[in-house]
Amino acid sequence: MAEIEALVFDVDGTLADTERDGHRVAFNRAFADAGLDWVWDADLYGRLLSVTGGKERIKYYLREFNTDYAAPADLDDFVAGLHAAKTRHYKALMAEGRVPLRPGVERLLREARAAGITLAIATTTTPDNVSALLENTLGPGSLDWFAEIGAGDIVPAKKPAPDIYDWVLRRLGLSGPQVIAFEDSGHGVSSAADAGIERILVTTNGYTRDQDFSRASLVIDQLGEPGRLPRRADGATLEAPVDLAFLRTL
């Protein structure tokens, strides 16, 4: 197996549990601002997460769950406006410190930086959402920790398509065997695997724990901290938190 040259991270659900208490809340606030009576509760939002991308998720909701709504003729502009409002609310929630990084994330990022391992991001969320999360958890300047940030509409096809990982790998000048991808969802695993990434580590959350991770190298509940060790899907506990030494054994 090739030496690890880079760690590539998904954002929502992977770096932080942003979906339930971040994005979902921001969507609902944007709907209220627009005078809409739409409410995405936690269960409905879990179903909507089968579609990646916020604008795509709104259209999916209208197509499958709110078919009585008389959508405007300029649907794309309407959805884009809602999504822009949602992003503003999300950034405000992040500024309030509502959503911390998941256990072990900051520790592993700092260890990789100290070891000279390249860091990158491959996500379907917008660049504004990425910066809001990072700057309000890791602090100002933390965007510079990442050599490349592939986010939002920078590629036309979102996960599970491999496009965002393909883009990041090209920008890094690396091939799939040289990197480890960190994901939380089945769509993310498919995206990374189809881009040729052979080592994929999944940290599940409440929305994703029952998804198909058959193409992942390891599925655990979190990266872990001293005194809070990761658990595999079968309930077995790792002997130590995930660090670079452990990643080299994948």
Image (cartoon, rainbow, N blue to C red):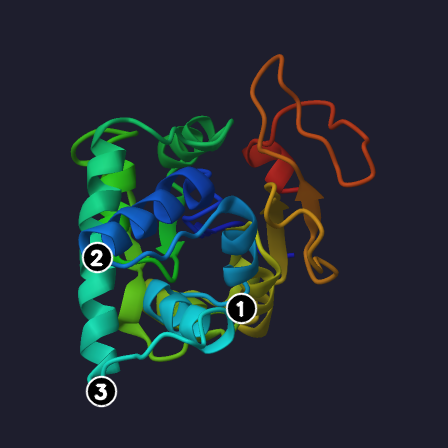
Report x, y in % for residue 198.
63, 62
Specify which label sits upstream in the sequence, 3 or 2.
2
Q: Would residue 129 be found to the left or right of residue 15 on screen?
A: left
Q: Nearer the viewer, mark 2 or mark 1?
A: 2
Q: Please indicate whether residue 220 sits to the left or right of residue 35 in the image.
A: right
91 and 212: which is toward the camera: 91
Crowding near pointer 2: few (<14 within 10 Å), some, many (20+)?
Answer: few
Q: Secondary structure at mark 1?
A: helix
- Secondary structure type for disc 2: loop
Q: Please state, as top left, top right, bottom left or bottom right, where the N terminus lies in the image.
A: bottom right
Q: Residues within 10 Å of mark 1 (few under 14, many from 20)?
A: many
Q: Which residue is mark 3?
A: 73
- Give the residue type at disc 2: Gly
Q: Nearer the viewer, residue 2 or 134?
A: 134
Query: Disc 2 and disc 1: Cα gap in Å?
Result: 36 Å
Residue 186, located in which quarter of the rendered image?
bottom right
Q: Disc 1 marks which residue?
A: 191
Name which residue lies at 53% across and 55% down.
44
Name the quadrant containing residue 138: top left
Q: Earlier in the sequence, mark 1 or mark 3?
A: 3
- The extreme top residue here reads 227
* Residue 79 percent location from the top left of the image: 25, 71
**Which residue lies under the disc numbered 2?**
35
